[in-house]
Each structure stands twice: as structure tokens, then as C-alpha cells.
Image: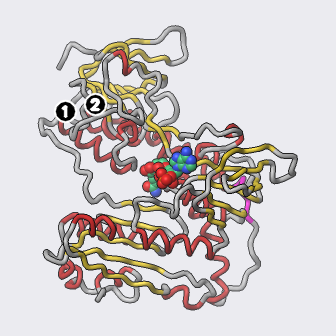
Amino acid sequence: MTDYDYDLFVIGAGSGGVRASRMAAGYGARVAVAEERYLGGTCVNVGCVPKKLLVCASAFADHYREASGFGWAAEQPAFDWGQLLANKNREIERLNGIYRGLLDSAGVELFEGRARLLDPHTVEIDEGGSGGSRVTADQILVAVGSWPDMPPIPGIEHAISSNEAFYLERLPERVAVVGGGYIGVEFAGIFAGLGCDVTQIYRGPLFLRGFDEEIRAHLAEEMRDRGICLRFESRVESIEETAGNDDRLRLHLDDGGTVDCGEVLYATGRRPLVAGLGLENCGVELGEQGEIVVDEFSCSNVPHIWAIGDVTDRLNLTPVAIHEAMCLSRTLFAGEPTPVDHEAVATAVFSQPPLAAVGLTEEEARARYEEVDVYRSRFRPLKLTLTDNQERTLIKLIVDRSSGRVLGAHMLGADAPEIIQGLAVAVKMGATKDDFDAAMAIHPTSAEEFVTLR
Ligand code: NDP
């Protein structure tokens, strides 16, 4: 027990902040959390959860198309965007309520307002009433996440970010997506599946930089086969509002070309949401992107100020923020200093088809190891053999020849995230190619390809 009002004050009730609050309270700490926007943060409100629901919605286009191959004759059913959004919004409200209940039952006090650090132990919270309340805390955790970053080009005010994409009043006929990261690729697939004409614009030679090159190239092929127009090595110079009916915007590209569309979604990265937090009052060090610089225990340069999740710009993924929260709670309140392990984190892009990976790409492995064996299989999934869908699945295992250790597993194809999640356990444990081969196949599946690679 300390003389402060709380042992831990958390700023931000997103995935990381809520987990840290609950765990710390579970260890007996007196905890409060402040949230100015929505409970559950980006993931629950304008990120992973609604995104996955939209991906599921858009995948029905394929299911209906493929049904006739299995003898199911049906007219193409009508799609109602308004109905989908209303259902999605209801589910998010339910989740907001669950998060509130979780904090409540853990004994965590919730302040619904904007928090600002006045000094290294004092927080002021503006809950919209007259004057902010001030509280003190022994330890402070900043878990405020990130916000879409829009480049300052002429006409950028006409563009939307992923935040608005989840609340569009109507689906436009034509959509342009700028950026070749997770969000751009996922939304290109969502809009295309829901019937929009999609152009995705990326400044480099091949999108999804950082993923295995062969897998990225294969995804580009599959997306083009689905009718998505991919314009690589292309930059938008300006956005012009036009008098077009549905196409109210015209994008001017650096190669002199133009793209007309009803909406343009910018998915060009996110930045740590540190503005106005009062970090300067405490001397907290920020990095080049505005991120809070932390050590392996998530501690900033100020000993009792900690930070986790996107605001630290390490690996900006929800499960990583949750893991960082668990490590931090143990470090602070269980007497077990626990560094965060960011190695071999499995990840998925919910593109269509989806992509998932754990461990090193072929390019990374070749740069780090002397001899690398690459096993791959490219095949047509059994289900599609009765349909006119020509999609191919691609899987890859990257192996260190001298030890036999599997360094990376990659997959592009139906169920890739579900399959790679299981393999992530094996890769994290240091499984070898022999271990993979010793596992009996489950037949007929796509996953069995991983244990029958020759
Ligand atoms: P990313 O950082 O993944 O990608 C940003 C993309 O925009 C890159 O292709 C980048 O190009 C490009 N870009 C950056 N600046 C500009 C610019 N000024 N002009 C044109 N293009 C630009 O960001 P996202 O917005 O896609 O996603 C944000 C974060 O959210 C991700 O880092 C990810 O961690 C997380 N996320 C995770 C998901 C998941 O787990 N499935 C889903 C969605 C988001 P270049 O490659 O050349 O730098």
C-alpha cells in the first residue's frame, strides 16, 4: 500500500489497458482506468472485431457463387449494407457492455473522460463536468493506442480512414484504397466482396512489405483474379471533388493517370496517440514516430511510467498489447519481473483469400542462416474442385538446414489464420521439420500439406 490514491492508474481502456487493469487488480492492486472514447479501444470498435465481421459478410459473395457446384441453385440474394452495419453496431455495443462489466467485477474504477499527466504521479481527468478531477498514483500506465495517419496532400479532407469506413452511410459503386498494409489489403477485399469496384494504390513494387515475398505475389495474383485493380509503384498527388453522381472524387496520380471513385480510403499507417497527454510534464522520452520509448519490461525512461500497445510502436497487434499487459502486471504486482518476448509472433491479414504467417520469411531466413531449405505446396483446395473458382492455396515452410528447425510457416488460402495459429505453437517451441513429418496428417484437409511436404 502506498499513500497515493491508486497503486496503478491506466490511461486508455483498449485491449492492453483493460487487460493490465484487470490483472493488476487481481493481484490486489488498487486500480483506476480512464477512457475518453469507447471501451475496448480500436480493436473492438473500429478494428479487428468489426473488420472480421465485414470480411465474413463479404465472403458470402463467394459462397453464393460456389453453391451451384454443389447442387444448390439460388438467385443471387440481395445485400443490405444498412442491415449489416446495424447488426455490427449492436454487437459492438454488447461488447462495450461486457468490457464495462469486466472492469467493474475486477474492482477497477472507471473514469470516462480525458486524462492528462500533471506530474509523474498526478493525473487530471476531464469528464466533461465543471473542472477536472485530480488523482494520484504510484505507477502510471499509458495504453492510449494509435490513430490513422493521413498524408498532407491537397484534398486529403475528402478521404476517409478505417474509422469512417465502418460507418459509411452507403456503399459507393467505386472505391479507391490507398496504402498496401494490413488495413488497405483487408478493406480492398471487403469492398470487392460486397460488390464495389475497387482500385488499390500502393507506392512500392509489391504490397504487404515485411511478409514473405512469394506469398505477397500470390495474393496480388488472387486479388487481381477477383477483379481488384492493383496499381503498384503509384502515388496519389491530389484528390479533387468533382460533380460526378456516384464518383464524387477524382484522384490524380504521379504517373499522370486518374482514378474516379465515390470514396477513397486512406490506410497509410497509424501514429501513437500521445498528443495532449502531458508526457512532456514528466520528461517521458518519445521516438521518431511519437512513440513512447520503452525497455523490454515496457518501462519508459521515467521509472514508474509504463507504456504498452500501439503507443509504443513495437508490434502493433491486439494480442501483443494483451501479452505486454500481462507481462507488466506480473512485473509490477506479482513480484515476477517479466520481459516481453516479441519473437515468432503469429499474424494474419484477413485478405481474401486470407494470409497468415509465423516466424521468418524466406528472405529473412536467407539473410540470417547459412543454408535454408524451403518447402512449398501450391494446390487447389478440395472444396473448390466442384466450382469454377480457380483460387490456389500456397503454403511454405522455411527450415534451417543444419539444425532442421522450422524457422517460419506461411500460408495463403482458406482458413490460413486458423491453421497457422496451431502451427505457431510448434514453431515457438522450436519444432524441426522431422517433428512436423512425424505428425500424422488429417485427411482430407489443407492443413495436412504442412506435415506431408517433401
Ligand atoms: P501499415 O503500416 O500496415 O501499412 C501502411 C501502408 O501505407 C504501407 O503500405 C505503406 O507503404 C503505406 N504508406 C505509408 N505512408 C504513406 C504515404 N504517405 N503515402 C502512401 N502510402 C503510404 O498500416 P495500416 O494502416 O494498414 O495498419 C495499421 C496497423 O494496424 C498495422 O501496422 C497493423 O499492425 C495493425 N493492423 C493489424 C491487423 C491484423 O492483425 N489483421 C489488421 C489491421 C491493422 P510502405 O510499405 O512503402 O511503407
Q: Nearer the viewer, residue 44 or 366?
A: 366
- Magenta range: 79-83
Query: For the image shown, how many numbered marks are present on the structure?
Result: 2
In the rendered image, the vertical position of residue 202 relative to residue 303, given as above or below: below
Q: Is residue 431 visible?
A: yes
Estimate the x, y position of residue 210 in percent, counting from the top left: 40, 59
Q: Is residue 90 visible?
A: no
Q: Is residue 436 magenta?
A: no
Please tell me the numbered disc located at residue 332: 1
User: Which structural element holds mark 2?
Assistant: strand
> Amino acid under label 1?
Leu
Residue 196 shown left or right of residue 244 in the figure: left
Residue 254 shown left or right of residue 316 in the figure: right
Which colour assignment does the render follow?
Answer: secondary structure
Going 72% across and 55% down the picture, which residue do you hit? 256
Position of the C terminus by quadrant: bottom left
